[in-house]
Amino acid sequence: MPYFYIQNIEIELVLDLKEAEDEGEDEVLMYPYHGGPNQLWEYKDGMIYSKHNGLVLDLNVETGNVSTHEAHGGPNQKWHFDEDGTIRSDVEDLVLDISEGRIEPGTRVIGYSKHGGPNQIFRMVTVDEE
């Protein structure tokens, strides 16, 4: 299955991993696209895997923060690419959201109640790898 990057439709920044001090559990931020493995993803079994560390997008239900974590297949790791451009979690229908609608690089990605604003609308762009 090909890798893809996840780009916000309005600000054209992409989901990017900021490496954590502890191994794994890198937080997800928005940054300009450069094509590194920390910006590339693969979708399988309802989970979104990072090319960078092999971990999956994980929603912390208590804080709303999104990071990568070892796959366990729980509802906080299951995601759906909806036709309206939102990426919906199996947890309480929360969707990926650029925190506070901010448009600058380095803004956190969180899980938030769906409202359909542009900070919740993304497109998946397939990358041709050689």
Image (cartoon, rainbow, N blue to C red):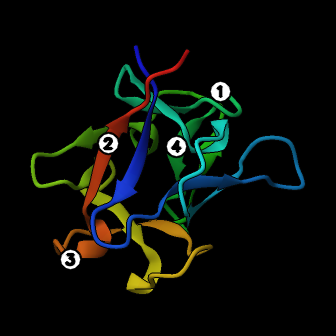
Q: In x, y percent, where is residue 21?
A: 89, 55
Query: Where, by quadrant of the figure, is residue 98 drawn?
Result: bottom left
Q: Which kind of residue does numbered mark 1 sit on?
A: Gly
Q: Are marks 1 and 4 in contact (CB under 8 Å)?
A: no
Write the residue at 56% across / 71% down.
108
Task: Determine whether 82 is above or below 126 in the image.
Answer: below
- Give the foreground label among 2 and 4: 2
**Distance of label 1 from label 4 (alpha carbons):** 10 Å
Determine which of the numbered discs, if any, sits on residue 117 in the image. 3
The kind of secondary structure element at disc 3 is loop
**Distance of label 3 from label 1 (alpha carbons):** 30 Å
Q: Which kind of residue does numbered mark 2 sit on?
A: Met
Q: In x, y percent, where is residue 65?
A: 55, 64
Lower sequence index among marks 2 and 3: 3
Residue labelled with disc 4: 57
Q: Which kind of residue does numbered mark 4 sit on?
A: Leu
Write the residue at 23% across / 42% down.
81
Q: Residue 101: tell me if it is visible.
A: yes
Lower sequence index among marks 3 and 1: 1
Residue labelled with disc 1: 54
Q: How many marks?
A: 4
